[in-house]
Image (tube, helix red, strand yellow):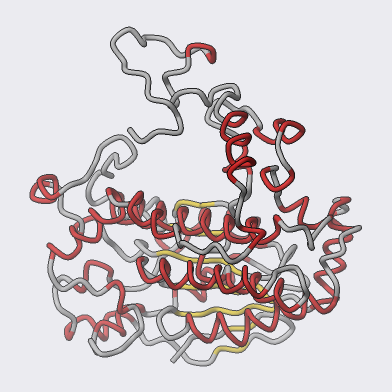
Amino acid sequence: MTTIIRVGVVRLCSRNAAPSFLNTQSASPLALTQNRSIMGKTMRGGPRPIKVPPYPYKEKNYNVFNSFFDKTSPRMDENSKIICVEGPIAAGKSKFAKELADELEMCYMPAVDMDLVYINSYGYDMRKLDPQLPELCRSYDATNFCREPTHPLAAQFQIRMYMLKFEQYIDALQHVLSTGQGVVLDRCCYSDFVFAEAMLRNGFLSSGAHSVYHEIRQNTIHELLKPHLVIYLDCHVDAVKQRIKARNLDHEVNSKVFTDAYLKDIEMYYKQHFLKDISTHAEILIYDWWAGGDTEVVVEDIERIDFDQFEVDHHDKKMKDWRFPLESLWGEARIKYCNQKGVMMNLFNVPRFDVPELVRSAEDGKVWRDVWFNAPGMQYRPGYNEDMGDTGLLFKAKVPYNEPM
C-alpha cells in the first residue's frame, strides 16, 4: 500500500511500517544489497560508512571488462536510493531537497534550467547571439515563457526541459550505481508531462506539439529505472500565488501564465495522474506545505518506510525496476547508464515535420549554424579552443564542436 503522510495541524499516516528486519529472512542475498530503511545521519549517530570506494565514473568508462573487477551490488546500502521532490512552483522544493540530501548524506541535484543549454563550458552566454539570429532560432527560457507563453518557441522550450530532466536522471542513475550514494532530485522527468498538459489546456501548447512531446516521452521514459520515493509538497493555489508574489521576481509577478486555471491544472495533473501512476512503483509521501514544514519530521517518516517488504513478492510492481537477482544484471544496468547516454539521448530524434513551430527552414538553420558555432568557445570541442586559453594542443586533433568525435 502506498505510504501517504500529510503534515499540518494534524499528521496522519496510512499505515505503520513494520520493522525492516521482519522481512530479511525471506529475501534473497542479492536482494539485500538495498536492505532496510533509509537512515539519516542523526539516527545513525555518525557519517555514513563507505563500504566500497566510489568509482570515478565521470573520468573513467565502465564496461564489461571493468564489471569483472568492480562489482556494483557491494556498494549498495539502505541509502542507495533515488528520491524525487515534487510540487507546484514556489512550494519550497529546493530548500527542502537540499536539507533532505544533507541529512540523508545523499547527492543533491538541483532543478534543471535552460542555462544548461545556453551557457557553454567557457561561461559564455549564447543568448547574447539572439540579435544575429532568426526569430525561431533565438533563445527561449523560463523567463521568456512567463512573459510570452503563447510564443511559437514555447513548444521547443517544453521539449527541451523534458530532455534536460531526462539527461539529469541518467546522471542520477550513474551516480547511484557507481558510488552507492543516493540522490535527491528537485523535480524529475517523470513528472514533466504535468506541465505539458497544463500548457495544452491553457493554450500555450498546440495539439501538434503536444502529440510530438508525448511521442518523444513514450520513446524515452521506459529506458530509465523509476525512483524509490517521491515526496510531494502540496500547496493550494492561493498559497502558490502568495509565494510567487513574495519572491517578487518581475517576470513571475507580472506573468500571464500563473492564472488560477493554470495553477489548478498543474495541481490536478500532479495529484490525479502523476502521483497515481508513479505510486504503482515508488513509495509516496505527501505533505501539506503551504506554511512550510519540518525536514526532520519528513526524515523520520522516511526512516519508517520498509523498502525490503517489496522484495518478498517478485510479482509486486513496487520497486520492480530495482530487482536485480544476479550481479551481472547490476553490471548491465550500470554499463547502460554510464556508457550509453548518447544512445538514449538519440531517442529524442523523432522525425515529425508536421508541427511548424518545431521546424526550422533550411535558410534559418544555416544562419543559426554559422552564428552559433563561431561564438566564443564553440568553434572546437571544449579543451581545443586556443582563443579561450586552451593550451597543449600541439598533439591534439581539433574536432569541430558540431561534428562527432
- For image coordinates 57% across by 74% down, the residue present is 211
The one nearer the camera, 58 or 181, is 58
The one nearer the camera, 327 or 395, is 395
Does the rendering let one see residue 41?
no
Image coordinates of residue 2 in percent, x first then y, are: 47, 88
Q: The C terminus is located in which quarter?
A: top left
Q: Quadrant of residue 9?
A: bottom right
Q: Is residue 284 left or right of residue 200?
A: left
Image coordinates of residue 90 in percent, x first then y, are: 75, 62
The one nearer the camera, 316 or 286, is 316
Q: Is residue 247 left or right of residue 340?
A: right
In the rendered view, would you say 60 is above or below 179?
above
Image coordinates of residue 88 in percent, x first then y, are: 70, 70
Q: How many marks?
A: 0
Does the rendering let one see residue 330?
yes
Image coordinates of residue 347 in percent, x first then y, are: 39, 60
Q: Quadrant of residue 195?
A: bottom right
- For image coordinates 33% across by 7% down, the residue present is 394
Q: Is residue 267 left or right of residue 369?
A: right
In the rendered view, would you say 10 is above or below 371?
below
Q: Quadrant of residue 245?
A: bottom right
In the rendered view, would you say 3 is above or below 387?
below
